[in-house]
């Protein structure tokens, strides 16, 4: 997702849609002032066009015009009550409203449905994503320290996406279960024939159902998933409840120098070490490993992250 390219939802007006596309093309070529002019004219004629309002807000923010960016994102939010585009997140970045708002399911589902087709290539080739490999090595190291074999009867891959983490761990488990909010991502994972069970859904609700059904897992993974969650306390507590005795929980998150949670310019959440240690301790799990790492590159710079491994 680029600064000026929101998730596109048609206005229902062919002319307005064409003007929007023309503006996005101009912005992509660096002519942001002309793009802003076209978008301003477009929303004036079609005031309910949320994607155009969002793009206008992004361009104004890029130009340093905070006041008018806030106005545009506010209109985008009004036109888009389900927050498909993430206007509330942008407003938070500009200091308006909740500083760490929860991401809506509509926003996340549309985001990942849109990028499912190019997701693997974008992460592994352009962004040099290493999350699954980092997790695998961290889990192996933690188990080595416990003098336990790297073998699991049941493994749960939360936010499984297209199955990158599942592929890294498939040979270590008898049963592999994956859940993801995006139907398009799950379809990509299904095509890889890695999983014994795949579900589309909110993983918080999925965990609640698994707790009620008494399901237990020897390993629960969350590879680069919690960057879309604004609080991990309850999630980690629920994960602890589906772990088998001596079960392992391993995850990666982006990090920052603070103690709590911060919404980044990339519209992902970063976590400070103190928050993570507190959340793990509150769940009753024992922290086995917490290490700094670079999970991928972005704009040619390493993205600072943490990998954590805990046990029941």
Image (cartoon, rainbow, N blue to C red):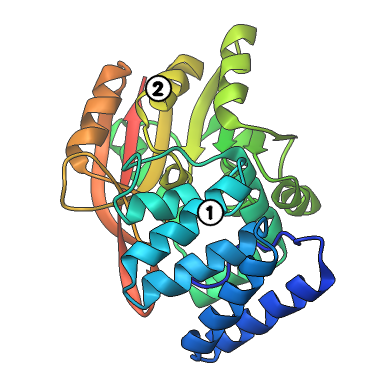
Q: Which residue is mark 2?
A: 234
Residue at left 36%, top 36%? 143
Q: Is residue 180 above or below residue 291?
A: above
Question: Real-space Cα distance between discs 2 and 1?
Answer: 33 Å
Residue 287 falls in which quadrant of the image? top left
Could you say where residue 286 lies in the image, as x and y percent from the top left? 27, 23
Could you say where residue 277 lies in the image, as x and y percent from the top left? 22, 31
**Quadrant into which the N terminus falls:** bottom right
Residue at left 34%, top 25%? 233
Q: Is residue 87 above or below residue 64?
A: above
First in sequence: mark 2 or mark 1? 1
Q: Is residue 51 above or below residue 263?
A: below
Q: Which residue is mark 1?
A: 75
Residue 229 falls in which quadrant of the image? top left
What is the secondary structure assignment of the residue under circle 2?
helix
Residue nearest the viewer, comparing 120 with 82: 82
Could you say where residue 249 lies in the image, as x and y percent from the top left? 42, 31
Other-residue count near label 2 (Cα within 10 Å), few / some / many at <14 / 14–19 / ≥20: few
Are circles 2 and 1 on residues that touch, CB within 8 Å? no
Residue nearest the viewer, comparing 9 with 174: 9
Residue at left 42%, top 55%? 90
Left or right, 281 with reference to 230: left
Instruction: Between label 2 and label 1, give the one nearer the viewer.
Output: 1
Q: Is residue 140 above or below residue 53?
A: above
Residue nearest the viewer, comparing 270 with 164: 270
What is the secondary structure assignment of the residue under circle 1?
helix
Residue nearest the viewer, comparing 86 with 49: 49
């Amino acid at each position: 997702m680029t600064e000026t390219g929101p998730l596109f939802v048609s206005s229902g007006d062919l002319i307005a849609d064409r003007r929007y596309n023309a503006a996005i093309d101009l912005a992509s070529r660096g002519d942001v002032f002309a793009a802003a002019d076209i978008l301003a004219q477009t929303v004036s004629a079609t005031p309910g066009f949320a994607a155009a309002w969002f793009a206008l807000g992004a361009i104004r923010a890029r130009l340093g015009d905070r006041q008018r960016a806030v106005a545009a994102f506010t209109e985008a939010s009004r036109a888009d009550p389900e927050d498909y585009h993430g206007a509330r997140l942008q407003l938070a970045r500009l200091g308006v409203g909740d500083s760490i708002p929860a991401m809506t399911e509509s926003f996340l589902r549309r985001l990942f449905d849109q990028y499912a087709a190019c997701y693997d290539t974008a992460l592994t080739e352009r962004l040099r994503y290493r999350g699954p490999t980092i997790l695998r090595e961290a889990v192996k190291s933690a188990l080595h320290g416990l003098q336990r074999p790297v073998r699991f009867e049941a493994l749960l891959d939360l936010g499984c996406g297209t199955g990158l983490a599942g592929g890294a761990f498939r040979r270590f488990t008898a049963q592999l279960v994956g859940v993801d909010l995006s139907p398009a991502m799950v379809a990509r994972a299904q095509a890889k024939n890695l999983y014994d069970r795949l579900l589309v859904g909110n993983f918080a609700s999925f965990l609640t159902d698994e707790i009620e059904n008494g399901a237990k897992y020897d390993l629960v993974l969350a590879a680069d998933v919690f960057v879309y969650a604004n609080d991990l306390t309850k999630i980690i507590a629920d994960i602890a409840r589906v772990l088998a005795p001596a079960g392992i929980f391993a995850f990666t998150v982006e990090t920052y120098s603070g103690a709590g949670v911060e919404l980044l310019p990339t519209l992902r959440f970063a976590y400070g070490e103190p928050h993570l240690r507190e959340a793990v301790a509150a769940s009753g799990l024992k922290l086995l490993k917490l290490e700094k790492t670079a999970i991928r590159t972005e704009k040619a710079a390493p993205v600072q992250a943490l990998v954590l491994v805990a046990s029941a």
